[in-house]
Image (cartoon, helix red, strand yellow):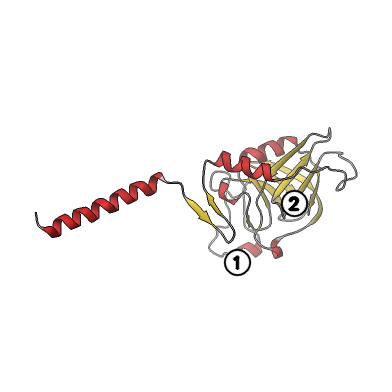
Amino acid sequence: MSNKSKVTLSRRGFLLSAAATGLAAPAIAQNANTTEVERDLSEVVRRNISSFRSLEWQPYFSNLRNGAILVDISSRALHMWEENGSYALYPSSVPQSEDLTRRGRTSVVRKVTGPSWAPTPAMKKRNPEWPDFVGPGPDNPLGTHALYLSWKYYRIHGTHDTRKIGRRSSNGCIGLYNEHIAEVFAKTRIGTQVLLI
């Protein structure tokens, strides 16, 4: 065996061991202000929830008739109160930019399990390659359940892409993990008041 072959084998061995070490190490994500180690999703969700602050409903609603949902765009959280006063807090995705964000009062006008999806005219203009229609299933951007609001095109819905939760990632809607939208969906009535701040 020549010296050249030994060097090649050594380099190959080094690269293979480096790749194996890299596979065993956790992924590191960086943004402008933090370095964060990506771990099990349930651990990340617990950490995010613990950083949210719970809220009282009285500053935002005059009553809890039919329940109430408050979406805080800044903290990327959905707060829900049932008519009996029970409270729950969920991490959410929010619109990508301020021009896609709508704030104010609305209500739930329709509930759909296994929703279908079609891009709005504005979405199709921005993304002409998007399909015109997606039926229920794992490729559907609305996840497993959707709450349709009185504002045209706006929904609170699930998502199969869990990376979107806790981020500015939607085209205007509020997204939740599928297991969380199932809980919210079960507790929500037609007429539930919704406030986005």
User: Is 187 above or below relative to 70?
Assistant: above
Taking 104 as reference, is 182 left or right? left
Residue 91 rendering spot, x and y as whole percentages: 67, 45
Front-lying residue, 114 or 68: 68
Proximity of marks 2 and 1: CB atoms separated by less than 8 Å: no
Front-lying residue, 172 or 119: 172
Mark 2 neighbour density, 10 Å: few (under 14) some (14–19) many (20 or more): some
Residue 161 rendering spot, x and y as whole percentages: 56, 48
User: Is 14 above or below relative to 128?
Assistant: above
Q: Residue at x 79, y 34 (%)?
A: 86
Where is the N terminus found, in terms of image quarters? Answer: bottom left
Q: Residue at x 70, y 50 (%)?
A: 155
Taking 97 as reference, is 79 left or right? right
Q: Amino acid at mark 2?
A: Asp
Label 1 belongs to which residue? 126
User: Is 45 above or below relative to 127?
Assistant: above
Residue 115 rendering spot, x and y as whole percentages: 64, 45
Taking 152 as reference, is 48 left or right? left
Corner quadrant of residue 191? top right
Q: Which numbered disc flags the more N-terminal residue, 2 or 1?
A: 2
Mark number displayed over residue 72? 2
Q: How many numbered markers are drawn? A: 2
Q: Amino acid at mark 1?
A: Arg
Q: Nearer the viewer, mark 2 or mark 1?
A: 2
Q: Secondary structure at mark 1?
A: helix
Mark 1 neighbour density, 10 Å: few (under 14) some (14–19) many (20 or more): few
